[in-house]
Amino acid sequence: MLQNYVKAAQWKSSEAAIYPFRMRAKWLMCIYCCDEFEDPALFRKHVDEAHENFTVSTAFTHLGRGKNYLKVDCSNMKCRRCSEPADTHEEMTSHIIDYHRNKSTYQMNLEYQIGLHPYRLEKDRWMYFLCREKLPSLIKLCRHTTSHYLDYTCDTCGRRYLTVDALKYHIKCSHTGRYYICRKCWKGFPSPQTKREHVKSTKTCWPFSCVYCGDRFLSWEQKQRHLVESHGRPETSYTCPECTLVFQSRKLFYNHYKVSHTDDSFMCTCCGLRFESKNRLEDHGLGHTGEKTFKCHVCEKSFLRKKSLTQHLWIHSDNKRFVCVLCEKQFAQKVSLKCHMRSHHLDVNLEM
């Protein structure tokens, strides 16, 4: 059964011309097929031509659990029945009720918060409908919009959130004993490792889904390969609009864009290098301090990084995971197997 906000959004979209979208860096992403557009007019043309039979309720299924609203472009908002234009959602709603009232209109609870966040999108002129604030870029418009919808407040610490599910997630993470929550099934786990293992082993919790067949994937790249191989979608490359560098992976492009062309990156105070995340910056910073804080409890050897210690511990393990395919000698570490191959089987060409 559709929830009230989905019903309200579905009703509005069936009566008025609106265009649901996502924001990705400087691009508008079609919520139905994930195609990206820099020009809002081309985006609207694409939706009209390629997704005439898709519904807003379908778009909600692509959002993921916890999101109860859609961003919609209302630049050319007009009545689908008589083409009467409107400047606001309220004007359009009043027009439909006054001139096109039908059975579905009578049944609709229009007092319920409608599941749409309205925007007016024109290239180089981005505006939010509720406050008519004009922003210089799509990214800044997205950040500004969020401030209008922080309606859910944590009674314990006072932090505010966009949706009730986001608030629930915060409470489970910050004010209970289970700090790592799966956003798909809301199960809690004692460590990030156990959460990752849960996600990998539970296909229904995989974060990416195909808009055509519903199959789920662990990564965006796996989903893209599936779209190309199973549904004939052309392979996609990502060109940076600022410096024209081309990337084959969306992740590589976003990391580049964040580090090179925004103020959201994290800069090392020692050498000036920038990183896309705080964790990457902290990991880089260890190279400047040289402090080896991770010590092996067996041989007391110290390491800069926890990952290096974890790899080292395999030396002390009886589990010899890596086996030479030529002489069947076993090794605890892959690097040891590679050294063995170079020393004893140098004349054999094998893919390692």
Image (cartoon, rainbow, N blue to C red):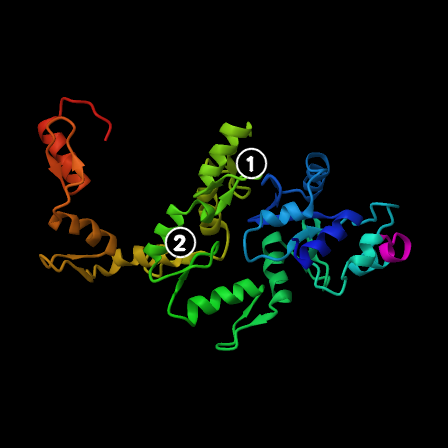
Residue 172, relative to residue 257: is it above or below? below
Which of pointers 2 and 1 lies earlier in the amino acid sequence? Answer: 1
Q: Describe the element under mark 1 as helix, strand or loop.
A: loop
Quadrant containing the C terminus in the rendered view: top left
- Image quadrant in which you'd find residue 304: bottom left
Residue named by callout 2: 274
Q: Is residue 81 left or right of residue 265?
A: right
Tell me which segment is drawn in magenta: 95-102
- Image quadrant in which you'd find residue 343: top left
Residue 113 visible in the displayed image: yes
Residue 243, relative to residue 169: is it above or below? above
- Image quadrant in which you'd find residue 30: top right
Q: Where does residue 113 sit, x and y in percent of width and height?
A: 70, 63
Badge 1: residue crowd in 10 Å (few <14, some 14–19, many ≥20): few
Q: Is residue 346 left or right of residue 81?
A: left
Residue named by callout 1: 213
Q: Residue at x 13, y 60 (%)?
A: 297
Residue 202, relative to residue 192: is it above or below? above
Magenta-span inclusion, residue 183: no
Looking at the picture, which amino acid does disc 2 mark? Answer: Arg
Q: Is residue 19 left or right of residue 259?
A: right
Circle on res. 140: none
Q: Where does residue 341 sit, x and y in percent of width and height?
A: 14, 30
